[in-house]
Amino acid sequence: MGFDEVTLLSEAEKRLCAEVRLPPPLYLKMQEVISRGVFSGNVTKKADGHQFFKIDPNIVDRVYDMLVKKGLALP
C-alpha cells in the first residue's frame, strides 16, 4: 500500500496541482528543491528556480508563489 502525498497538501496546493496538471509527488519535490535553494541563498527570485526543472517556467513560478504565500520565500 503506497503513501498518499495528497494528504500532505493544503486545499490551495491541491487546486494548484489540478490547475497545472502537476502530480502531488512532483509538486512536493519541486517545493523541496526550491526551498533548499532559498535557504542556501541560491534562489532569491522566481526566475532562479527555473534552472532546476525541465518543465514550463510558468509552473515553476506558480510553485514559487505558493512558497511565498507560506512565508518560505521572498516575493
Image (tube, grey):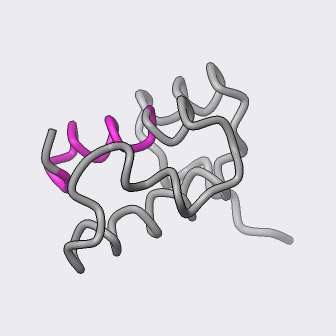
Identity of the residue drawn at 45% across and 58% down: 31
Extreme residue in the right direction: 1
Identity of the residue drawn at 34% across and 74% down: 36
Main SS, magenta residues: helix
- The picture quadrant where one finds residue 47 is top left
Question: Horizontal and vertical percent for residue 19?
Answer: 62, 19
Specify whether residue 11 is painted magenta: no
Left/right placement of residue 69 relative to residue 36 reads left
Compared to residue 47, the image places residue 37 above or below, namely below
Q: Name the one closer to the observer, 59 or 19.
A: 59
Q: Name the one closer to the observer, 4 or 72.
A: 72
Left/right placement of residue 20 relative to residue 7 reads right
Q: Quadrant of the N terminus?
A: bottom right
Question: Horizontal and vertical percent for residue 14?
Answer: 54, 32
Question: Horizontal and vertical percent for residue 34?
Answer: 40, 62
Compared to residue 37, the image places residue 26 above or below, namely above
Compared to residue 11, the image places residue 32 above or below, namely below
Identity of the residue drawn at 67% across and 58% down: 25
Tell me how many marks there are: 0
Specify whether residue 70 is painted magenta: yes
From which residue to which does the magenta span run? 62-73
Q: Name the one closer to the observer, 44 or 19.
A: 44
Question: Horizontal and vertical percent for residue 74?
Answer: 13, 48
Extreme residue in the bottom direction: 40
Q: Quadrant of the C terminus?
A: top left
- The picture quadrant where one finds residue 4 is bottom right
Identity of the residue drawn at 41% across and 28% down: 12
Compared to residue 2, the image places residue 67 above or below, namely above
